[in-house]
Image: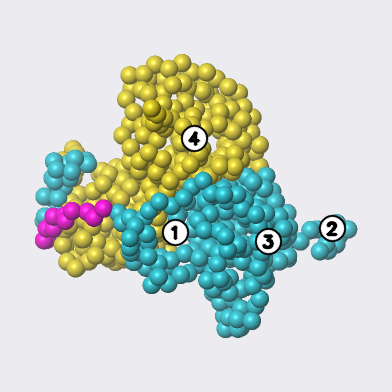
Amino acid sequence: MYYEVKKMTNMIVIAELSKGSIHPSTAELVTAAHAYGGEPTLVVPCTDASIANSVQSLSGVSKIIAVKSDVFGGSDSSGWASALDSAIPSGTVLCLATTRSKDVAARLAARRNISVVQDVTGIDGTNLTSPIYSGKANQTVSVSGEAVITIRANVFDSAGSDGSCDVSVVDASGDVKTAVQEILQRANTRLDVSEANIVISGGRGMGSPANFAHLEAVADTIGAAVGASRAAVDTWAEIPHSMQVGQTGKTVNPNLYIAVGISGAIQHLAGMRSSKYIVAINKDADAAIFQHADYGIVATWEEALPVFQEALSGLLG
Amino acid sequence: MNRVIVGRAIQMPTIVVLVKQVPDTNAKIVVQGGRVDLSSVKMVMSPYDEFAIETAIRHKEATDGTVTAVTVGGPGAEKILKDAKAIGVDNIVRVWDDSWTDLDSNALQSVLSETIQALGATVVYCGKSAADTGAGSTGPGLAERLGWGNASNVIGAEFSESVLASMPVETGVAKISVPLPAVISCDKGDFKVRKPNVKGIMMAKKAKVELMSASSPSSSISVASHSMPPAKPAGKTFEGGASASQVAQLLRDEANVL
């Protein structure tokens, strides 16, 4: 009689660092590790090992290794990957699908001559599903052997917090190849669309870039980031590409996405369709965006936004 | 190819730009029998690759050298190489072996790494991700295999014996010094990309595609199936601006997202 051995490889979760502390989505990676192969070792890249204390209570973690190195204070992906590689055992490695971690994942996989699967949103045994064509379709791949896997945030439930795991600290050094010369500070301190839980975006229907001030006013009320369609970015120089949501801009999956004066071109839909809830405000009842909206408001933004903002501040005030 | 400037030998860079053929980003994607059906979809160069080509040509204009566009693919992928030639690259190379099917990242990067070394490249440009998978693994993975530095999501570059690359960070835009050799993955920059002109298109027609091959390890990742994202249930639609207050209420009470 044979038993199915689910745990074929060591599972390793790399905690996501954000502004010097551990990103809460790290708890989602632990759940994903259990879905794929079993109880993971949690690796915390850090410059100060005390940050690992904040994850000691995560449930379902077999051990915690704080990997301490100066390279984790910087952004060079070669430094990150070489330091991690030296300190963590072989196995299947999970990280969060953020810009930096996707780079580090690709390097770590290449260092170990294994493959990387990015942006995973579904796990079924050793089958992994990721969106392709910016979410117009899904691709499921089957994995044999070890791999490095990045997991999209807000997809898996967070692991519980009734664990108690000791932290062992390992010093590591990395091979840094690049150097930051200067950082040009952004005058605008608004939240980035890819980090926000709520995004309000404007399209060409806003009429002029100055009218984005009305979106900013709503954004300030509800703590949202302000985005834009490609049409708006291409039409108005004042709307930077960093605000663009869609196939050649950023892909977002916030809890709430509010599209204002956006018709819903296929490229825009590709960047926001996975949002949990979608609100569309458009004067054209036939606009494609309404087919994807949970709540559609057929009205001009001039009519709808002031009412919307007042109602929102009433609810939140 | 050395030239002497004030008594110092400067190596002119051999610049490589990686390009990939993908479905037109405006195309509707259809899944038939568990696989994406691309038979009636127009194939184009992945949009970010246009920024990589532009940056590669600017590098050549700043330092001299040559630009070679490289793609991995069957004969059908030669169209985008001709497009790259029409825009202004010097040489075009297609890498292929008929035994290759779905190359996973490990296999693809091995092939590219061998090719880049055979071409003697000093710098490789590519798009930050391809418009099909959106993975963005090739730039950093290739750099790791070659033992090179890399920079990703680059929106601008200045060229000397190293590349000073601009990339967005949390607080603004960072300028990163990237010593060569290196791999630079390009995002949409704050500049216009050049388009092919008539002369370029005529030259591209006559241009010869150089064929290369490389050894590829077997893939450990294979595509099992494709599917369409689950359809969303129909939403609620309201008429008139006054309904916005009702929607705000629903966002709190029904959707629970405020």
From mark 1 to mark 4, how far is it between C-alphas? 25 Å
- Of label 3 and label 1, which has the lower sequence position? 3
Q: Position of residue B122 (x, y in %)?
A: 71, 56
- CA neighbours of label 4 inside 10 A, class few (<14), some (14 to 19), many (20+): many
- CA neighbours of label 3 inside 10 A, class few (<14), some (14 to 19), many (20+): many
SS type, badge 2: strand
Question: Does residue A100 appear left or right of residue A255 in this picture?
Answer: right
* Labels 1, 4: front one: 4
- CA neighbours of label 2 inside 10 A, class few (<14), some (14 to 19), many (20+): few
Query: Which three-letter amino acid code belongs to the residue tagged 3?
Result: Ile
Marked residue chain, label 4: A
Check if mark 3's residue and mark 1's residue have beta carbons within 8 Å.
no
User: Foreground residue, A8 or A13?
Assistant: A8
> Label 3 belongs to which residue?
B15
Query: Which three-letter amino acid code belongs to the residue tagged 2?
Result: Ala
Q: Position of residue A316 (x, y in %)?
A: 19, 39
Magenta part of the chain: B230-240
> Label 4 belongs to which residue?
A92
Q: Give me the chain that's yellow.
A: A
Marked residue chain, label 3: B
> Label 2 belongs to which residue?
B9
Query: Which three-letter amino acid code belongs to the residue tagged 1?
Result: Asp
From where the camera sits, is residue A125 visible? yes
SS type, badge 3: strand
Q: Give me the chain that's cyan.
A: B
